Amino acid sequence: MKKLVSVMSIFALTLGIFSQSIFAEETRSVSKISQAHIAELKHSFNELGIDEKTQNTLIKKLENGQILDSMKEENIQKTINKRSFNIEKGLDQSEVVTFADGSKIKYGVRPVNSGIKSVAPGSYTVESYWATGTVNYSYYNDYTIVKGINNDFISKAYNPTVAVIGGTFTTPTVTIHRAKETSSKYAYSQMDFTYTFSLPLPPVSATAKLYFNVGNDDYDTTLSLSDTK
């Protein structure tokens, strides 16, 4: 089974392509994060499997005006290059990358319909996702794998969700750019939005894109457009 390869989180989940622009330098000034945001961050960090001691260290780092390692552009690019998803491993796939400060990135794809363990020709709904604990997003795709050559397709891309703790974001959009695979190109859809993460930091702004590809009886999720077979 041919694997799709990212050139740079159906869910290998710019930044497309995740291209991130930081409009302010890190500072060392201390500023308290609200209790409401702390509670949200801790819940989100729990979801990533970060222990309480490390959570407190990461929150203190944000209060000191420093971005987390999981938010840095160079680390995002390294993470993108690590991924390797393919349909032979089933629908529920994810990767978790842990950085020196204890922050994490988790990205992948999971079936919306529970109980699906493997994939044969047929129709499926999956959720692609990317999560850092501070910025988390995902969207759904309905797609069909048809036995044979060059006939897999995406029928629907929808339900984008975004959470930016202590920040703002534009309304996310989802688009199917190529519904059916061809002899040389994969079918693919895209989710995109822009956001600003502030908390006590100088604002960090970015454009985020997430892609879902289908073809060769296979699928992939990536942050960069890689639709050539």
Image (cartoon, rainbow, N blue to C red):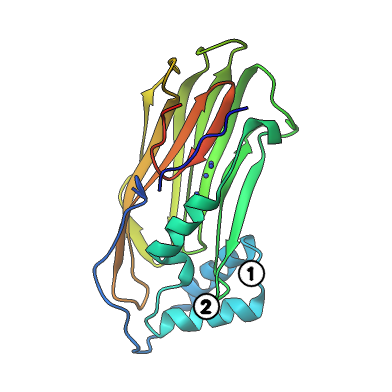
Q: Amino acid at mark 2?
A: Leu
Question: In the displayed structure, does residue 205 sit left or right of residue 226?
Answer: left
Q: Is residue 134 above or below residue 224?
A: below
- Name the image quarter holding the N terminus: top right
- Which mark is drawn over residue 142? none
Taking the spot 35% from the left edge, 43% from the top edge, the residue there is 192
- Which mark is drawn over residue 58? 2
Q: Amino acid at mark 1?
A: Ile
Question: In the displayed structure, does residue 193 sit left or right of residue 143?
Answer: left
- Which mark is drawn over residue 50? 1
Near mark 1 (Cα within 10 A), the count class, few <14, some 14-19 or many ≥20, is: some
> Image quarter for residue 100?
bottom right
Q: Is residue 223 above or below residue 32?
A: above
Could you tell me if the residues under marks 2 and 1 are in contact, i.e. CB atoms within 8 Å? yes
Residue 10 visible: no
In the image, residue 218 lies at what x, y percent?
58, 26
